[in-house]
Structure formats: structure tokens, C-alpha cells
């Protein structure tokens, strides 16, 4: 069965819930964001509809924290109010999680956007494909 590419965080998490997986669904969403983003003040701005509706909660807290961080980060880039749902405890981790291994921990902390760091999710830079102005649309 073919599912349309997600155009929002809610649609992305719905795909993840039915077996598409979070990484694959996220990639599809980012591909969509690359197509719809407008550049303002040297940063990509995506439609508020991408992040305004609360996503489905997933079984893995780190993925929920990532979805919350992504919504907040996109809102900050768009210079709009962060959706209220982003403040729910479901979108924060109890313990810090680090990507990149022990040797890169300090570098990862320094490169992680605030929206993720405040959730204790230290993942390094995000949205590389979207942030690149050289991406083919």
C-alpha cells in the first residue's frame, strides 16, 4: 500500500505508527519541507501547518522528544509562537540522550539547537538538507 508523503509532523508520526518507521517518515517530511520552504532573513521558513497540530505519541520517548524539538525549532525559524503542545512533558526526556558517541559528546552538545537541548536530546545539527540553499527543489 502506498502512503502519501507526510506534510506535517502529525502525518509523519501517523506513518511511523503504521510501520513506515520514524527515520523514513522524517526523511519524507524533510523532502516536503525543502519543496515548500521560503527563505527569510537567511533561514528557511515552512508553513505553520507543518508543526501546529500535535503529533501522535510514539512508543519511544526519544522520538517524541525529537518531534517536539523539531516543531519548536521550525517555529523559531519561522519567528512564530511555539505550539502549546510542545511544552507537554511527553515531549521531554527524563535523562539526557546523546548522538555521536562519547568522544564527540562535547561537540554534539555545542551543535544541538536549543529546542532539542532543552528536551535533553543532544543530536547535533538538524535539518541539514533543509538548511542548505544549494538543495535542488
Image (tube, rainbow, N blue to C red):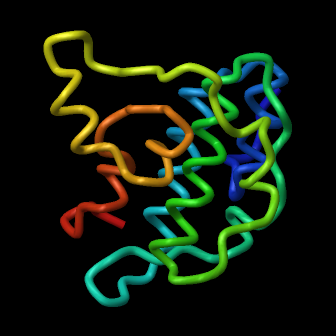
Q: Nearer the viewer, residue 12 or 52?
A: 52
In the rendered view, tell whether residue 51 sits above or below residue 119: below
- Residue that appears at 60% across and 82% down: 80
Residue 21 coordinates in the image, percent (x, y): 66, 21
Picture layout, residue 11 above or below residue 63: below
Position of residue 122 in the picture relative to residue 52 (left or right): left
All told, the count of numbered labels is: 0
Quadrant location of the C terminus in the rendered image: bottom left
Q: Is residue 73 left or right of residue 83?
A: left
> Which image quadrant is residue 49 in?
bottom right
The part of the image, by quadrant, that contains residue 63 is top right
Q: Determine the residue located farthest toward the top in the rendered image.
A: 102
The residue sitting at 30% across, 89% down in the picture is: 41
Instruction: Report x, y in % for residue 98.
Output: 38, 21
Q: Nearer the viewer, residue 19 or 3?
A: 19
Residue at figure coordinates x 51%, y 79% from the top left: 78
Q: Would residue 84 appear left or right of 98 to someone viewing this image?
A: right
Q: Residue drawn at (44%, 82%), measured in percent from left and top?
A: 38
Image quadrant assignment for residue 34:
bottom left
Which quarter of the rendering shows the N terminus?
top right
x, y percent for residue 75: 57, 70
Residue 136: percent from the left, percent from the top? 28, 63
Locate residue 128 relative to residue 58 in the image: left or right: left
Q: In the displayed image of the protein, which residue is found farthest to the front?
A: 94
Amino acid at each position: 500500500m502506498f502512503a502519501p508523503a507526510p506534510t506535517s509532523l502529525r502525518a509523519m508520526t501517523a506513518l511511523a505508527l503504521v510501520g513506515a518507521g520514524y527515520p523514513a517518515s522524517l526523511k519524507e517530511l524533510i523532502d516536503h519541507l525543502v519543496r515548500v520552504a521560503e527563505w527569510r532573513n537567511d533561514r528557511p521558513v515552512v508553513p505553520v501547518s507543518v508543526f501546529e497540530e500535535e503529533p501522535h505519541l510514539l512508543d519511544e520517548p526519544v522520538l517524541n522528544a525529537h518531534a517536539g524539538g523539531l516543531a519548536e525549532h521550525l517555529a523559531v525559524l519561522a519567528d512564530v509562537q511555539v505550539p502549546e503542545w510542545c511544552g507537554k512533558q511527553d515531549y521531554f526526556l527524563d535523562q539526557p540522550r546523546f548522538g555521536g558517541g562519547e568522544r564527540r559528546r562535547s561537540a554534539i552538545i555545542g551543535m544541538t539547537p536549543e529546542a532539542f537541548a532543552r528536551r535533553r536530546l543532544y543530536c547535533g545539527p538538524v535539518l541539514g538538507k533543509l538548511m542548505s540553499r544549494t538543495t535542488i527543489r
